[in-house]
Image (cartoon, coloured by chain):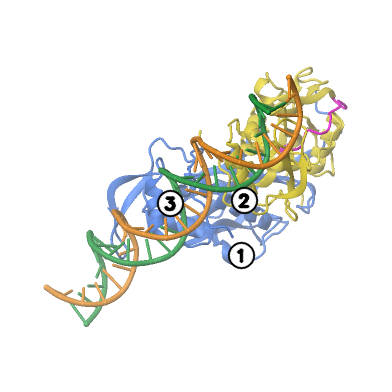
Chain colours: A blue, B yellow, C orange, D green
Amino acid sequence: MTVPPTAGLVPVTVDIVALTVLNGELNVLLVRRLLEPFAGDLALPGGFVLPNETLPAAALRELDEETGIVPPGHLEQLRTYGPLDRDPRGPILSVAHLLLAPADRIPQAGGDATEAGWHPVSTLGALAFDHATILNDAIERARNKIEYSPLAATMCPAEFTIAELRAVYEAVWGQNVDPRNFHRKITGTPGFVTSTGKRGGGGTGRPAELFRVADGISPHDAVLYPPLLRRSM
Amino acid sequence: MTVPPTAGLVPVTVDIVALTVLNGELNVLLVRRLLEPFAGDLALPGGFVLPNETLPAAALRELDEETGIVPPGHLEQLRTYGPLDRDPRGPILSVAHLLLAPADRIPQAGGDATEAGWHPVSTLGALAFDHATILNDAIERARNKIEYSPLAATMCPAEFTIAELRAVYEAVWGQNVDPRNFHRKITGTPGFVTSTGKRGGGGTGRPAELFRVADGISPHDAVLYPPLLRRSM
DNA sequence: TCTTGTTTTCGTCATTGTGACGCTAAGGGT
DNA sequence: ACCCTTAGCGTCACAATGACGAAAACAAGA
């Protein structure tokens, strides 16, 4: 009752695609690599899974080590890449994760990273390894996910206005959304948001009502029915 | 430029959840294990990834070895399980795959399997390892997938009637679908099916028109817009 | 203070998609 | 010839949405 000798033993890494919305734009958390390979290049935070460690635990640990933040957000597995033709060191398997988080914490580089920060996805150059592919897959997943789940709210502060939530949808989808129809849809969907009674002023125009995610709703598995569909492209 | 010594080396397996519709019921392809652990128990086909092998190649190879069939269907990665607390031999990572296939080939056991065959998912006992969890996740994925993609057609023969396609939806969703509304939706969705002109008789009632998947459509990435939503439950 | 500009929020209206269901067409069996 | 079954077309009401008007509620400036 042991593993057959023909089985290959593979090093396993986790990579984290942390997405947020900053200044109305979709941003991803990137680090600059200290070590070879791809030293000096931008890359997704991530690293090797340690013995006796689960995948999500490894993802959170690497995120904390390299960026100094463990955002209160939604972490889910994205998909697994490899093991061939993606790392010059040889066959390595990478389990990519998607994290949707608010932008309220400031990343600080550590571990194998010399820089850590949010980068707008629209102005990115090349990334290390196959991280550009992983990032594209993650964005596509996020675009679909917020259609039928309330997860967009996890990219907002704990209390937010409908306009802030709309900014998330517009940034992730890259499309404009009509403010009036969006307001109707969000407030009319049971189990999405509940009013706090408070009003969040600050900016220009009429002060907006502050909402939070509805009670008893774990954005992890709640479902919007009917979904909030973006226009086909 | 080598893998750090703290990194754990992990054996990696692939498991395949092959789903089809047989006699109006959702079926999964299972094998009976020859070897320990879980010898004699039903399990998903799968096995260790060999050195210098990609994940989909390993999945197809194991499927061929253990069940004798490599169905012409849609293979996609489901998600990765482990590495802790799922195999008595120790930490093993398993990359589960989902295969949607027609039921036109007859499985024949081989390799580490003593039996291979389709089993209705509604009448299953315990499965080896965490395969029951994986199967549930796969069914949930399939349920969602056929809502917004034409992949249900990959569980039908090359030419099929609307009723056969509807049987797929009813079996996967576990819900009845109105035949008239379904016919309207399918034939009215551009890029789903095209008529072959032929008629498929055989059963009782008026002979139905035979369709095939629309030309130039790879069910892999085509999208139904608007989607075909099942009733919420 | 009054005006202008901005954003929020509530409504209106037309269109689309869908659920529910009636009805005819086209076969097989007795 | 009659009955039974399924295929395929059509109708109607309702729900959801896109497009857009307009009032409400603030800030800033004239």
**Range drawn in magenta:** B97-112
Residue neighbourhood size for the residue with mark 2, other residues' Cα within 10 Å, grouped as few (<14), some (14–19), many (≥20): few
Q: Is residue B114 left or right of residue A176?
A: right
Find disc 2 in the rendering and name its residue: B188
Find disc 1 in the rendering and name its residue: A124
Nearer to me, A225 or D16: D16
Magenta stretch: dominant SS?
A: loop
Letter of the chain that mark 1 sits on in the rendering: A
Same chain for the residues at labels 2 and 3, yes or no?
Answer: no
In the structure shown, which secondary structural element does the residue marked by tag 2 occupy?
helix
The answer to whether residue B109 of the structure is visible from this angle is yes
Nearer to me, A68 or C6: C6
Q: Is residue A213 magenta?
A: no
Q: Amino acid at mark 3?
A: Cys
Find disc 3 in the rendering and name its residue: A156
Nearer to me, A205 or A64: A205
Nearer to me, B74 or A103: B74
- Please state the horizontal and vertical placement of residue B17, each as a whole percent of the image: 72, 33
- Please state the horizontal and vertical placement of residue A42, each as a whole percent of the image: 63, 60
Letter of the chain that mark 3 sits on in the rendering: A
In the structure shown, which secondary structural element does the residue marked by tag 1 occupy?
loop
Which circle, 2 or 1, is nearer the viewer? 2
Residue neighbourhood size for the residue with mark 3, other residues' Cα within 10 Å, grouped as few (<14), some (14–19), many (≥20): many
